[in-house]
Amino acid sequence: MTLHRRALLTGGVAALALPNIAPAQEAPGVTASEIRIGSTNALSGPASSYSVISRCLSAMFKRVNDQGGIAGKQVNFIVYDDNYAPPRTLEQTRRLVEQDKVAFLFNQLGTPTNSAIHRYVNQRKVPHLFLATGADKWAQPQEYPWTIGWQPSYRTEAQIYTKYILEQRPQAKIGVLYQNDDFGKDYVNGVRDVLGPRFDSMVKLVSHEATDATIDSQIVTLQGSGIDALACGIIPRFAAQAIRKVYDIGWKPMMFMTNVSVSGSIVMQPAGAEKGIGLITSDYRKDQSDPAWADDPGMNEWRDFMRRYIPDGELGDNNYTYGYGAGSTMIQVLRQCGNNFSRENVMKQATNIAPLEIGTLLPGVKVSTTPTNYHPIRHMQLQKWDGKSWVRFGGVIEGANV
Amino acid sequence: MDGFAHQIIAGIATGGIYASVALALVMIYQATHHVNFAQGEMATLSTFIAWSMVEAGFPYWIAFAATVMLSFLIGVLVERLLMRPVQNAPVLTHVGVFIGLLLIVGNMTGWIFGYTTKVYPSPFTSSGPLMGGLISAHELGSTAVTLVVLTLVFLFFRYTSLGLAMRAAAYNPRSARLVGIRVGWMLALGWGLAAAIGAVAGMMVAPVVFLDPSMMTGILLYAFAGALIGGIDNPLGAVIGGFAVGVLENLAGAYVVGTELKLTVALAIIIGVLVVRPSGLLGRVVTSRV
């Protein structure tokens, strides 16, 4: 009898000492009825046009909750405003991790803002998932295993342009016009990835500073170097200047523009819509206004979601299709977790996504990750400006293996 | 050789931008003996005001004139409300106010008008590109406008009694007061004129670089270098200096230091001039008896 009681006591102590026997209860931010997820976005300030992404994600989690949640738990998605200011991002992220005790962080907006918390979240081993930024630095599984991006990085984009250039003109002389910072240098790296040892002989690099008044001098230099193909990693104001200048001086290179600087109203109209004819860029999303997707099942699923959960949302704003893609990826990862939402398992599932098709992404563009591939989307399709809109051409192209 | 000539022409076109802003800097220095760090942001705000008028359907030159007058009023108001209470404070206080003004005006512009790039129309158009597209009709036109403004400023300070009174108020406020000049109002007038010239500069710059709240941030630094080369108290010098900086910057960027150090060239010019010849090429050497 005594023996029996002692065994019982020993077992009880062992259970206390080894909390991982019941992981579902012990993981931070996870209770029997709830999973807490944290995020930051520019709900105010200069970048606040991106706040619709958070709106879209909140609505997607609401739909999940309406349908019974994940493994019987409701998702509680907490978004704080960081004003797109890195110090605020750090402050709000610490609040999410230390006070709100979220299970993990998801789709925080911006490159400088996420850079401010990159080290912090990796030291605390908090999953920092599917960030809303195109920088390539989120794909460093060795140094920063807890951080992973989502959309194709600027570097992947440059790889795709370079592959296309080589296919069209194998001996082309390539010019790269880039802003002298992390954003611009991702383009240089992408071109280098594809060309390898031929980089130095085939490429002319010209940079500019964000403080420059104009980039006329850079364009003149590039034209004088006998460039056949020009790839530009520059922000919208300079993109409009570059398109206009190249046209005005009567230069006709094969010209590629980063897909963050190709908005019709912000870049192409200011530059002069007819001056940009032939300009090439790329995308991985379906454009809502493209007649090819008028009756597309994937886009109809998204339109149905918008009608029911964000009835006043502007359908033409492609941040909604972006948000839908990122949100679908997150929900897939949560379902893969089963009933184990520990930080280790969330990270493990986020880096083991079997090729996943999402309704708002172009056919052939799939989301997939492995513990060594932290680039969830690596395919894009090229498109050309016809004077009025962007027209897709060719198949999807995959970025280079680096 | 072709490329060399092209770089010079492109430099002159960009230099025209610096020259017009440098002129506004000289204006306020002439009138108040201060360099207003918020000059660029105030000019951007003026340009946005003009932009909203053009968007609302006003003809270009009406919007232009109304903006110049409104900017003059804003300049006067800033002096009366912000500078006057600290007029006897040390110069560091003034610097503090200028920096505060820079942040307030810059952020206010973004808050009211948004941060996306906007198109500002040009009054000067041509049927085709001039000189192989290296210089546009607008760049020629805006250079002409800069020269007109320069002439007006020169005539105003040289030949009108108001101009003389303003110079006197800036150089020696106490003596000016003793001969009956209303020094306070002269300063306010100086601010108004500087804001008006800044508005003209902004409206000339915007069609080239596209309009957004940070349009002037970089330009102001180059303009300051230009103003220093020519002499911060000499309008003609500032205009020549502005063009010189545009050309030097392009040549240095293309052939000497590379594009990464273009901005450094402007800073090196500022420091070089201050060390070697603080009064600039055309500036007056000030000696004071002690």
Image (cartoon, rainbow, N blue to C red):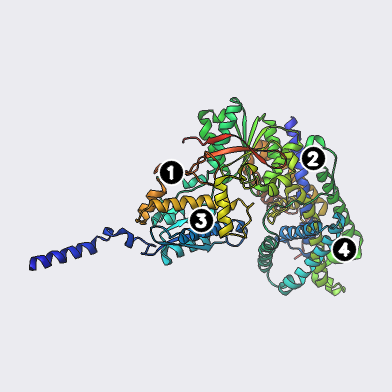
Same chain letter for marks 2 and 4: yes
Q: What numbered label is drawn on residue A186?
A: none
Q: Amino acid at mark 1?
A: Thr
Q: Chain of mark 3?
A: A
Pointer 1 indicates a residue of which chain? A
Q: Which residue is mark 1?
A: A369
Asked if the residue under mark 4 is in contact with the one under mark 3, i.e. CB atoms within 8 Å, the reply is no
**Identity of the amino acid at label 3?**
Gln
Identify the secondary structure beneath mark 2: loop
Neighbour class for label 3 at 10 Å: few (<14), some, many (≥20)? many
The one nearer the camera, B155 or B282, is B155
**What kind of residue is marked 4?**
Gly
Task: Evaluate if marks 2 and 1 touch, with contact meaning CB atoms under 8 Å apart.
Answer: no
- Tags 3 and 1 both on a single chain: yes
The numbered mark, 3 or 1, whose residue comes first in the sequence reads: 3
> Real-space Cα distance between discs 3 and 2?
44 Å
- Vertically, is B250 above or below A60? above
Circle number at residue B163:
4
Along the line of sight, the residue nearer the viewer: A217 or B272: A217
| Residue for badge 2 | B135
Q: Callout 3: helix, strand or loop?
A: loop
Q: Chain of mark 2?
A: B
Location of residue A173 with respect to A147 vertically, above or below: above
Report which quarter residue A245 is drawn in: top right
CA separation in Å, label 2 and label 1: 50 Å
